[in-house]
Image (spheres, rainbow, N blue to C red):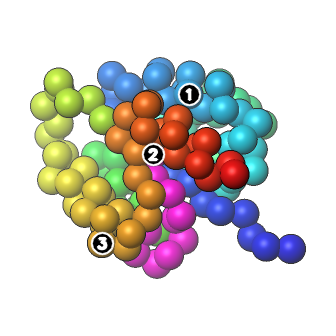
Amino acid sequence: MADRKCLALIAHDQKKNDLAAFAKAHEATLSGWKIVATGTTGGRVLDACPGLDVTRLKSGPLGGDQQIGALIATGDVDCLIFFVDPLTAMPHDVDVKALMRLAIVYDIPMALNRATAEQLIDFRRT
């Protein structure tokens, strides 16, 4: 039996509830994925969808972004959904840019907002 694909979930503070709502709306589809998430984001997703297989890493500013980046670089993440808040300054913006760069370098699908994430989930389901 093939291993399940791995999806990384990240959200800026002002987008965490949106990502949890997205996960709830797509819980059945996401149940087929192994999920890794930064700490607080993973907690919110688990609160909304306790049945999902979510591994919580460190909080983004405390190294969680780099942990997910490392998983991308080793080929252990197949897809990235990162709900970005473009209106709030992020003190760890350089980490966020590095993570997005890795997703591009390793050519994995990446969604930065709900509209794109909806399309990505629909596409990956087929």
Residue 25 image offset from top left, x and y in percent: 65, 25
- Is residue 99 depicted above or below 56 in this figure? below
- Residue 105 drawn in magenta: no
Q: Residue at x 34, y 46 (%)?
A: 60
* Dot label at residue 22: 1
Q: Which residue is mark 3?
A: 105
Name the kind of residue labelled 1 in the image. Phe
- Whether pointer 1 and pointer 2 mark residues with C-beta atoms closer than 8 Å, the reply is yes
Q: CA distance from mark 3 to mark 1?
A: 26 Å
Q: CA distance from mark 1 to mark 2?
A: 11 Å
- Whether pointer 2 and pointer 3 mark residues with C-beta atoms closer than 8 Å, the reply is no
Q: Secondary structure at mark 3?
A: helix
Residue 5 image offset from top left, x and y in percent: 65, 62
Confirm whether residue 58 shows in the render. Answer: no
Name the kind of residue labelled 3 in the image. Val
Residue 30 image offset from top left, x and y in percent: 68, 43
The residue nearer to you, when weighing 33 against 48, is: 33
